[in-house]
Image (tube, rainbow, N blue to C red):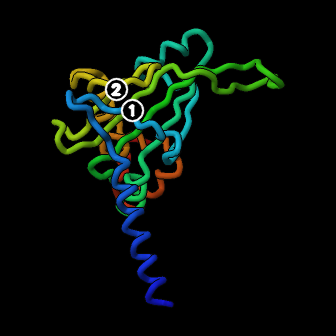
């Protein structure tokens, strides 16, 4: 009985490993990033309201600050917990949503509404600089890589707390990065 239970556990771990290994970026034949359909089931890192960087920041000007929701693929998250760094094939999904203050029973504060933009940051060893950005827009169709001359590349390189990423805005990961010695003090 114990031997068969051990075999079941071994098979389960192999199957789980194969499923999680498939959560990295997928590309079309012409190099576009395929939008992960299930990214909202990934690890939720943080949500910010009214953050004023990037092209979607225009919505802040009308007094309705958007929400930025950040998700990361589960295998990259597990690797980060162990090492304090992001492995190859990490993919962050940034979902930017409009906000509203009055609706239903709400009389104060803000809540999220429709999607303004969906963007991705991908770590892939095949890219120059290892990181690339993609903008899906509202439609979610496959995305071309944003040119390396765009401001997002220099901003992330200069201001990222860990590698090229804004871990300083992910409260559940800050202490891990500090403990592992990967957190840039200049990001505080």
Left or right of residue 147, residue 65 in this image: right
Can residue 178 be spotted in the picture? no
Of the numbered discs 2 and 1, the one sitting upstream in the chain is 1
Where does residue 172 sit, x and y in percent of width and height? 52, 51
Where does residue 152 sit, x and y in percent of width and height? 32, 26
Q: Residue at x 21, y 41 (%)?
A: 130
> Within 10 Å of the Cα at label 2, are there few (<14), some (14-19), or many (20+) other Cα atoms?
some
Residue at the disc numbered 2: 142
Where does residue 148 sit, x and y in percent of width and height? 21, 25
Please name whichever residue, 57 or 44, is drawn nearer the observer in this view of the structure.
44
Task: Relative to 46, say whether 176 is above or below.
Answer: below
Left or right of residue 175, residue 14 in this image: left
Task: Relative to 119, say whether 161 is above or below.
Answer: below
State the SS at label 2.
Answer: loop
Please name whichever residue, 156 or 146, is drawn nearer the observer in this view of the structure.
146
Q: Residue at x 62, y 16 (%)?
A: 64
Q: Which mark is residue 35?
A: 1
């Amino acid at each position: 009985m114990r031997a068969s239970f051990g075999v079941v556990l071994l098979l389960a771990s192999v199957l789980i490993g194969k499923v999680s290994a498939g959560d990295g970026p997928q590309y079309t034949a012409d190099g576009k990033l395929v939008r992960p359909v299930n990214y909202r089931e990934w690890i939720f890192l943080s949500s910010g309201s009214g953050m004023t960087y990037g092209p979607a920041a225009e919505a802040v000007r009308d007094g309705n600050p958007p929400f930025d929701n950040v998700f990361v693929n589960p295998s990259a998250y597990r690797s980060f917990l162990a090492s304090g760094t992001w492995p190859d094939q990490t993919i962050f999904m940034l979902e930017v949503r409009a906000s509203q203050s009055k609706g239903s029973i709400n009389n104060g504060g803000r809540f999220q509404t429709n999607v303004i933009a969906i963007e991705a940051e991908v770590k892939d060893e095949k890219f120059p600089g290892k990181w690339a950005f993609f903008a899906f827009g509202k439609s979610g169709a496959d995305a071309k890589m944003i040119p390396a001359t765009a401001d997002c590349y220099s901003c992330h390189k200069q201001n990222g707390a860990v590698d090229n990423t804004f871990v300083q805005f992910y409260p559940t990961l800050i202490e891990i990065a500090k403990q592992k010695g990967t957190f840039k003090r200049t990001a505080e």
